[in-house]
Image (cartoon, grey):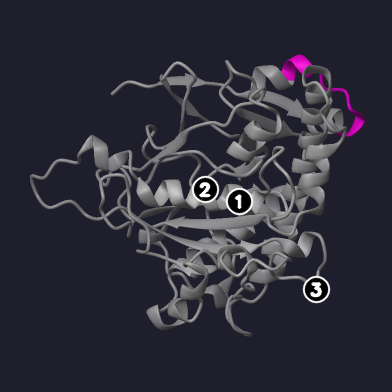
Amino acid sequence: MIYQGANPVLVCLDDLKSGNVDPKILEEAFGPESLGIIVVSGLPEKFMGLRRRLLSFASHLGNLSQAELEALECPGAKYLVGWSCGKEKLSNDKVDILKGSYFANCAFYKDPKLDSATGDYPDLPEYTKGNIWPREGLLVGFRETFEEFCVMVIDTAGLVARACDKYALEHISGYQEGYLEHVVKTSTSTKARLLHYFPPPTLETGSVEAEEDLDNWCGTHLDHGCLTGLTSAMYVDEGSLTLDISKGIDLPELESAPDPDSGLYIRDRKGGVTKVGIPRDCLAFQTGEALEVITEGKLKAVPHFVRGCRASKAAGVSRNTIAVFTQPNLWEKIDKDRDFAAFAREIVAKNTEG
């Protein structure tokens, strides 16, 4: 299959801070005819070091013993807090053992003492269960790096949200000024997902990799929050390394993906498929379903998927990345009738039926 490549809309962090982003840029990035993604450049100097450290931690985490990983699982939160592997199904109905995920609630952004969403929602444990961090002495510095990185992403998401508010104020009758920025910056429901895609399984002699398997590292889906913060993926040749965290956390990063067809793909508004690259020194933000509802469809959610590396091109190579899903507080209204808790329940029910 041949895919079109595209350069997403690029804005500078300083322009976001100063409010110097033309609303037309927002429409180009997030509007009805857009790819639903914007890239932010000019990030603080510490970003690159934090990114490398956190994504290196993903490899160290994914290579812990089974016992250590099981200690990080939280079945009571539907495996959406702590470690999760083999608990999801891909679109071809196969159990997903190609990647492992570490989930954390980002309520610490609102208050460092919080480790879960606030409010009485016993049927939404994926939000209200407390975080499960690695035990003391294991992956030293992981929690601090994770939290510092997520704070930077959410800070930046707040500025993107401010620009969206400015656009919405001009285009939506009765829009509440500053609402999306308020949602992003005051939420205790935002969640981060650190992903470790394991090196692709070795092919048996004479076997051929199926296109549908390659497209199923992470099947086509919509995020159901507001803005999803993304970093470029880090590819690590684990096959040539001895992963020993006592000798240092930061791992050598391949200059580029070993398989040029692997990475993030977006289904555009006309059904076409577009490969999107994120520069290593930038953050990207994708639109989610809650944003589309809040803006009455003026800004659209983006369907996307991740295409895996061919084993023939990426033997021993893992892929690490993180997604930070900025989401409203569970009690915040996303439209006249529904709060985010009700909306989240609808999404879960829809996904379960599917």
**Residue indicated by mark 2:** 346
Secondary structure beneath dot 3 equals loop
Residue 20 on the magenta segment:
yes
Residue 140 image position (x, y, % from top left): 64, 76
Front residue of this view, candidates 237 and 65: 65
**Residue drawn at point x = 78 percent, y = 59 percent:** 109
Q: Amino acid at mark 1?
A: Ala
Q: Amino acid at mark 2?
A: Glu
Secondary-structure class at tag 2: helix
Please identify, in this view, whether the residue under mark 3 or under mark 1 is nearer the observer. Answer: 1
Q: CB under 8 Å between callouts 3 and 2?
A: no
Graded by Cα atoms within 10 Å as few (under 14), some (14 to 19) or many (20 or more), the crowding at tag 1 reads some
Question: Does the magenta segment cover residue 77?
Answer: no
The answer to which of marks 3 and 1 sits earlier in the sequence is: 3
Would residue 229 be found to the left or right of residue 183 on screen? left
Residue, disc 1:
342
How far apart are the two marked residues, 1 and 2, measured between alpha carbons? 6 Å
Q: Is residue 288 visible?
A: no
Question: Is 166 located above or below residue 230 in the figure?
Answer: above
- Give x and y (percent) for residue 166: 84, 26
Q: Position of residue 52 (x, y in %)?
A: 62, 54
Q: Which residue type does callout 3 highlight?
A: Lys
Question: Foreground mark, 3 or 2?
Answer: 2
Q: Residue furthest right?
A: 18
Residue 298 placement: quadrant: top right
- x 33%, y 38%: residue: 215
Range covered by the magenta-colored residues: 17-25
Q: Are marks 1 and 2 in contact (CB under 8 Å)?
A: yes
Identify which residue, 145 or 101, lies in the foreground.
101
- Image quadrant for the C terminus? top left
* Image disc number at residue 113: 3
